[in-house]
Each structure stands twice: as structure tokens, then as C-alpha cells.
Image (cartoon, rainbow, N blue to C red):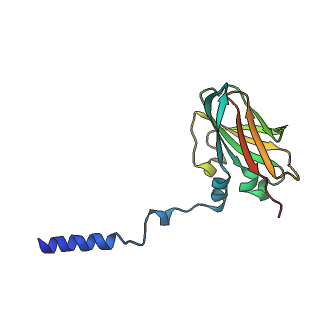
Amino acid sequence: MRLFLSAVATLVAFTGCSHNNAFDRFEMSAQRERSEESIQSAKLVAQNDVQGVATAVYLSRVDPGFYGDAEYFYIYLNSNNNQNEPLFILNDSPALLVEELPRENIFTNLTQFSAAWKRYYFVGFAKQNDVKDFKLQIQGEPGNALFMYKAVQEQ
């Protein structure tokens, strides 16, 4: 019995100090890390009631080499009322490009989330020169939301 308890105690002591654990296998690409730094969520509010949640990723920060010619966002909406396309506004200017995307799209890997009941958008705005802060607004159905971003600094 003593030999058994000694063996179990030794086994527990040495296997608890393993050099490999779950965090060693958790790696993110540089693009995914920038996406995680850029992602924001806000409540969709209509008439003082929360109607859903909007999430935005500032793509011009995630990949400035590819999305540097304008201000681009990947936005998805989680709401019960997804009938009408909302209005997207950046610093009081409406979007120049609004493309509704399928559930599985080229940006899905940036957030690792997709669901059939959400609506996904690729939204583009004119380049905001000499602006340090962005105010991204979503207006209309299902509700209004506000995001604040810092502009990408030119290198």
C-alpha cells in the first residue's frame, strides 16, 4: 500500500510540472492579433430598448497594406429585426460601399464566429485624411450603435 501511494504521489508531482500545456498550442496569426485589438461591440438601441448587438472590426488597422486606400470595416449585426439594411456613417459621412456578405466569408477567420441568424457587412468609407478619431455609427433598423476608433497612422 505504501509503495502504491508513493508511486501515485510521485506520478502526480512530476506530471503536474509538465512543460507542455494547452497554451503552448494556442497561436494566433499576426492578422488575427490585430483583428482582436481592433474589434469592438456595441448595443443596438431603439427607443431606449436594446434590440441587439453590433460588432465592428476596423480592417484598415488589421491589414493597412491591403485596406489602406480608404477606411474599411467588417461589421456584423445580431438582432431579432434584421429586415432592413441599416445606414453606416463615419464622421458624418455615409458609406460609399456596403456589401452584405454570406455567413462564411473572407473575414470569418478574423473573429472565428459565424451564425446563420447574423447579418454580415463589408463597409467602405472615403479616406479620412488628417483625422485622428473616427466615429462609426449604425443607424436605422434594428437600432443605433456608436463605435470610436483611432485612425491608422501613416508610416
**Image location of residue 31, percent across then percent down:** 66, 58
Q: Is residue 32 left or right of residue 17?
A: right
The residue nearer to you, when weighing 129 against 148, is 148
**Image location of residue 82, percent across then percent down:** 65, 28
Q: Is residue 90 left or right of residue 74?
A: right
Look at the picture and state if 1 lies above or below 104: below
Q: Identify the image quadrant of residue 65.
A: bottom right
The residue nearer to you, when weighing 16 against 84, is 16
Q: How many discs mark residues in the rendered view?
A: 0
Q: Is residue 97 left or right of residue 41?
A: right
Direction right: furthest residue:
130
- Kindly identify the residue that appears in the image at 19 percent across and 74 percent down: 6
- Kindly identify the residue that appears in the image at 76 percent across and 42 percent down: 136
Look at the picture and state if 134 lies above or below 17: above
Direction front: furthest residue:
48
**Image location of residue 97, percent across then percent down:** 80, 39
Quarter of the image with the C terminus is: bottom right
